[in-house]
Image: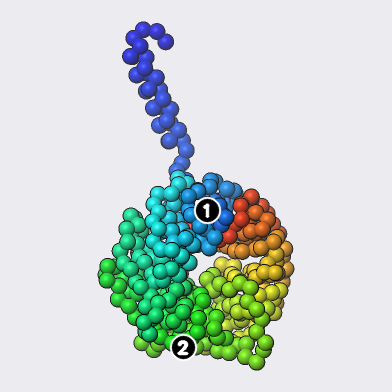
């Protein structure tokens, strides 16, 4: 190319710009519906995955202590809010694969929730206790709700979930209380408190329709139930004394109530310190049976159609997953994904389930019809798996 050097430089720039525009037009933007993240608990990273081809897209570092991290999503599924054990709240753009916001909001946090309208993100804290609420766009703090119990003591907060009407519901572990925070005025939350719900609530769930909040009790055999349609009735005990008269077993890992399994009017819950899952009749809130299992259950997670429940277990029997058929109420498969199975997550329509295997540094993907593995991905010390479909489910 000869002649005027300035003209040549302009021409080169125009050619480059045209090539960039052509590339932008010929490559469709990436959608989020089949995406998700896996926590690399020892590395402080997220692994962004896609479930159509069961592949890893990228890794996102800089998330602090992710040893007990959990995730919620923005309503457009683009942003993952990561709650770190070190008190960090991190906003990750999973399409661009990078951190776009991070605040150190506490010293030890154990989870969080996003409001029904997607504008508020709340974090549950062990240290300093209480709940802190942030603007989902900017991560600016909007409200601080100290967990000061009726007797004046402070408490760790667990079981924080979102509820319809832009409310958050959570429990005070040390105090045995459950609170509702109405965020109609985000800067001045309206609190409704229920005291003496039972000893040491350790985790909680909310039903998919947002009506019932259930807190598991570590200090007692039983659970506490709150009907959010009729909160004036207060909380009541269900499955009271399900282990009465039997020698308690040492508890190696607390079970999780999130992701509980429902088929029709029957719910399946992991029993604390027992080698069984409990069947709960949701019409009467009474026990409807039990299924003996391989060990102490941690998660009992329903396939989206409710037919099968997948259960993993605490140490030392944590290399196993069992599949329960809720029609026959029998175990139909015992699988061995590897050492230290920590979490399971179904794809939205249930054709696959992703299983994290911490001590073998892998995630295994199973076909839920054949119960056979179809993919295996290298992930360093994986724990929680969170798919973007959670963005549209209450309590997840």
**Residue 68, visible in the rendered structure:** yes
213 w.r.t. 185: above or below: below
- Foreground: 253 or 180? 253
Q: Quadrant of residue 308?
A: bottom right
* Structural crowding at the residue carrying mark 2, measured as other residues with C-alpha within 10 Å and reported as few (<14), some (14–19) or many (≥20): some
- Foreground: 296 or 285? 296
Q: Quadrant of residue 142?
A: bottom left
User: Cβ–Cβ below 8 Å for labels 1 and 2?
Assistant: no
Residue at x 42%, y 10% (from the top left corner): 1
Query: Mark 1 falls on what kind of element?
Result: loop
Q: Position of residue 52 (x, y in %)?
A: 57, 51
Say left or right for 61 vs 136: right
Q: Position of residue 218 (x, y in %)?
A: 55, 80
C-alpha distance separating marks 1 and 2: 40 Å
Colouring? rainbow
Residue at x 68%, y 67% (from the top left corner): 318
Residue at x 49%, y 88% (from the top left corner): 237
- Foreground: 81 or 347? 81
Query: What residue did someone put label 1 on?
Result: 44
Q: Position of residue 49 (x, y in %)?
A: 55, 51
Q: Which mark is residue 396?
A: none
Residue at x 33%, y 14% (from the top left corner): 6
- Foreground: 350 or 139? 139
Query: Mark 2 falls on what kind of element?
Result: strand
Query: What residue did someone put label 2 on?
Result: 236
* Structural crowding at the residue carrying mark 1, measured as other residues with C-alpha within 10 Å and reported as few (<14), some (14–19) or many (≥20): some
340 w.r.t. 158: above or below: above
**Sequence order check: which comes first, mark 1 or mark 2?**
1
57 w.r.t. 115: above or below: above
């Amino acid at each position: 190319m000869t002649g005027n050097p300035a003209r040549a430089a302009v021409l080169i720039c125009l050619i480059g710009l045209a090539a960039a525009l052509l590339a932008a037009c010929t490559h469709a933007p990436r959608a989020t519906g089949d995406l998700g993240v896996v926590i690399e608990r020892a590395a402080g990273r997220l692994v962004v995955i896609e479930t159509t081809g069961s592949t890893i897209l990228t890794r996102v570092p800089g998330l602090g202590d992710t040893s007990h991290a959990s995730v919620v999503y923005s309503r457009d599924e683009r942003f993952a809010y990561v709650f770190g054990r070190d008190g960090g709240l991190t906003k990750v753009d999973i399409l661009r694969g990078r951190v776009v916001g991070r605040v150190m909001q506490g010293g030890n946090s154990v989870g969080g929730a996003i409001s029904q309208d997607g504008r508020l993100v709340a974090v549950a804290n062990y240290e300093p206790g209480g709940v802190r609420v942030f603007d989902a766009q900017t991560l600016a703090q909007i409200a601080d709700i100290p967990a000061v119990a009726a007797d004046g003591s402070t408490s760790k907060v667990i079981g924080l979930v979102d509820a319809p009407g832009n409310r958050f519901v959570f429990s005070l572990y040390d105090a045995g209380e459950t609170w509702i925070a109405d965020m109609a005025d985000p800067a001045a939350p309206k609190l409704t408190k229920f005291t003496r719900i039972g000893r040491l609530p350790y985790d909680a769930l909310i039903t998919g329709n947002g009506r019932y909040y259930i807190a598991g009790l570590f200090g007692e055999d039983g659970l506490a139930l709150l009907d959010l349609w009729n909160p004036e009735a207060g909380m009541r005990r269900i499955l009271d004394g399900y282990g009465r008269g039997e020698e308690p077993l040492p508890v190696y890992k607390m079970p999780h109530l999130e992701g509980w399994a429902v088929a029709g009017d029957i719910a399946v819950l992991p029993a604390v310190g027992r080698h069984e899952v409990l069947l709960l009749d949701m019409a009467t809130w009474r026990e409807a049976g039990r299924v003996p299992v391989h060990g102490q259950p941690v998660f009992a997670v329903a396939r989206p159609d409710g037919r099968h429940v997948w259960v993993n277990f605490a140490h030392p029997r944590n290399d196993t997953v069992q599949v329960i058929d809720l029609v026959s109420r029998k175990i139909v498969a015992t699988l061995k994904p590897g050492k230290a199975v920590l979490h399971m997550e179904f794809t939205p329509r249930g054709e696959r389930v992703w299983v994290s295997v911490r001590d073998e540094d892998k995630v295994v993907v199973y076909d839920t019809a054949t119960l056979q593995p179809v993919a295996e991905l290298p992930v360093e010390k994986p724990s929680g798996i969170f798919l973007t479909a959670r963005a549209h489910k209450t309590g997840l």
